Amino acid sequence: MSKKTEFALEMRKLRRRHIPILFLMVFVLITAWTYWCIDDLDVSRLNDVSAMVFTNLLLMNTILCPIVMAALASRMCDMEQMGNTYKWLCTMQKPEHIYRGKVMAGSFYILLFTLMQTVLFWIISQPYGAGVVSRLPGYFTTIFLTSLCIFILQMNLSLKFTNQLTPIFISIGGTFTGLFSWFLNRWPLRYLIPWGYYASLCNAGYNYDETTRYTTYYWDMYPFLWMAVLTAAIIILYRHGQKHFLETVRETI
């Protein structure tokens, strides 16, 4: 069976699962919150508005995206897990193809969601700096790779547990840990968990002067080393999840 067919089958399974609405609602929330912040902000006190927007958008993704990835993974796996339908599905598809199709379908939604956010970042930041275009690849890479890693991890958990509340609770715990990693930047926590890579791959920072109450934003080199680490983690999670899914199906059959 071709990859195109595998992808099409998984998309048909999700046809009535309201996944686009889920992503659209989160995107609208991020957009409304960002424009509210900009409208209520004295931009004359900031040296680089685009860096501020960059940082805050990644922080919002740290809060919202893990739950969305967990919900997406759960919606893709819950019926098959509850119904234990793998022995019928595998008469038409190989187990590894089913797993690959799920990853491709999830990656498609993550890609669209990331593109929408990248365009949002460009539209908001364009009036405040001509160099914002050079920041778009870094923003896109950070959102896409981190969300994809979390999604594959959550899908592996959803395929492991029959009760889909367990992966959701794990995602909530991971979200809080990832959020704490923003404020504990001297700890290696953000580099050890996938939820922390929204912060790990953020190449914008700031210094706050308590005396003048002035915040100075700055840009660093993009952390290609940690991007490579995250990419390796994605590959490992994918290979491990596919192998475990294959073993589970064989035991079922």
Image (spheres, rainbow, N blue to C red):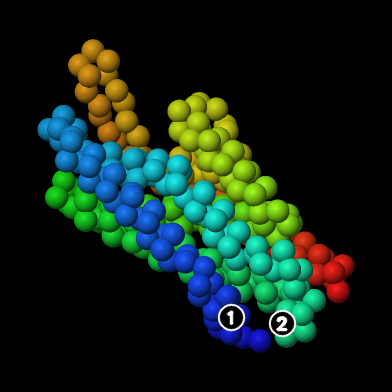
Left or right of 247 on screen, residue 129: left
Identify the residue position indicated by label 1 in the image. Answer: 9
* Mark 1 Cα shell of 10 Å, populated few (<14), some (14-19), many (≥20): some
Left or right of 2 on screen, residue 96: right
Residue type at tag 1? Leu
Q: Is residue 143 above or below residue 93?
A: above
Q: Tell me where residue 144 appears, x and y as whole percent.
A: 46, 57
Numbered disc 1: secondary structure: helix
Q: Do the residues labelled 2 and 1 touch (CB within 8 Å)?
A: yes
Left or right of 179 on screen, residue 86: right
Identify the residue position indicated by label 2 in the image. Answer: 93
* Mark 2 Cα shell of 10 Å, populated few (<14), some (14-19), many (≥20): some
Q: Tell me where residue 138 appears, x and y as whole percent.
A: 38, 53
Q: Is residue 15 visible?
A: yes
In the image shown, does 146 or 86 lie closer to the viewer?
86
Which quadrant of the figure contains the N terminus? bottom right
Question: What residue is shown at x 42% (from left), y 60% (from top)?
Answer: 23
Q: In this view, does 113 lie above or below 208?
A: below
Residue type at tag 2? Gln
Numbered disc 2: secondary structure: loop
Question: What residue is shown at x 27% (from left), y 15% (from top)?
Answer: 210
Q: Can residue 203 be seen in this view?
A: no
Which quadrant of the figure contains the C terminus? bottom right
Question: What residue is shown at x 61% (from left), y 74% (from top)?
Answer: 101
